């Protein structure tokens, strides 16, 4: 899979989030930013993203997915946000 394919899947399945995807083949790093994460525990945030990719993980199209989630306020000061 390509990063653009992973991004398209997530955008179609998780409302109100901005996604930044890196990686290739079946190993990807996902950074998700959205109000949807406000008030959710870190585990619930991870489950939301893993759930959106469950079919691809089960099929083996995605093997390793590293996930970081932020609310927009958290993203403003996140180290991954190069424009901060």
Image (cartoon, helix red, strand yellow):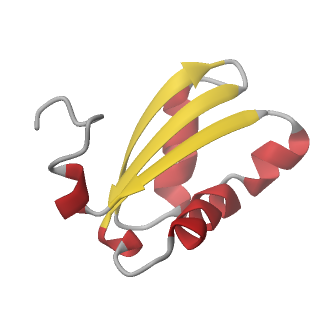
Q: Residue at x 54, y 33 (%)?
A: 29
41 w.r.t. 47: above or below: below
* Residue at the top extreme, as displayed: 24
Figure disc tally: 0
Of residues 22 and 5, the one nearer the viewer is: 22
Of residues 10 and 68, the one nearer the viewer is: 68
In which quadrant is the C terminus drawn? Answer: top left
Looking at the image, residue 9 sits to the left or right of residue 15; the answer is right
Of residues 25 and 9, the one nearer the viewer is: 25
Q: Residue at x 52, y 66 (%)?
A: 42
Looking at the image, residue 68 sits to the left or right of residue 78; the answer is right
Q: Position of residue 44 (x, y in %)?
A: 58, 72
In the picture, residue 81 is in which quadrant?
top left
35 w.r.t. 4: above or below: below
Q: Is residue 62 visible?
A: no
Q: Residue at x 50, y 43 (%)?
A: 8
Q: Is residue 24 visible?
A: yes
């Amino acid at each position: 899979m390509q990063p653009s394919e992973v991004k398209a899947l997530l955008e179609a399945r998780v409302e109100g989030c901005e996604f930044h995807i890196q990686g290739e083949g079946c190993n990807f790093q996902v950074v998700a930013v959205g109000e949807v994460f406000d008030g959710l525990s870190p585990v619930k945030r991870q489950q939301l993203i893993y759930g959106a990719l469950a079919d691809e993980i089960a099929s083996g199209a995605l093997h390793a997915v590293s996930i970081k989630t932020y609310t927009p306020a958290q993203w403003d000061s996140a180290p991954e946000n190069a424009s901060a």
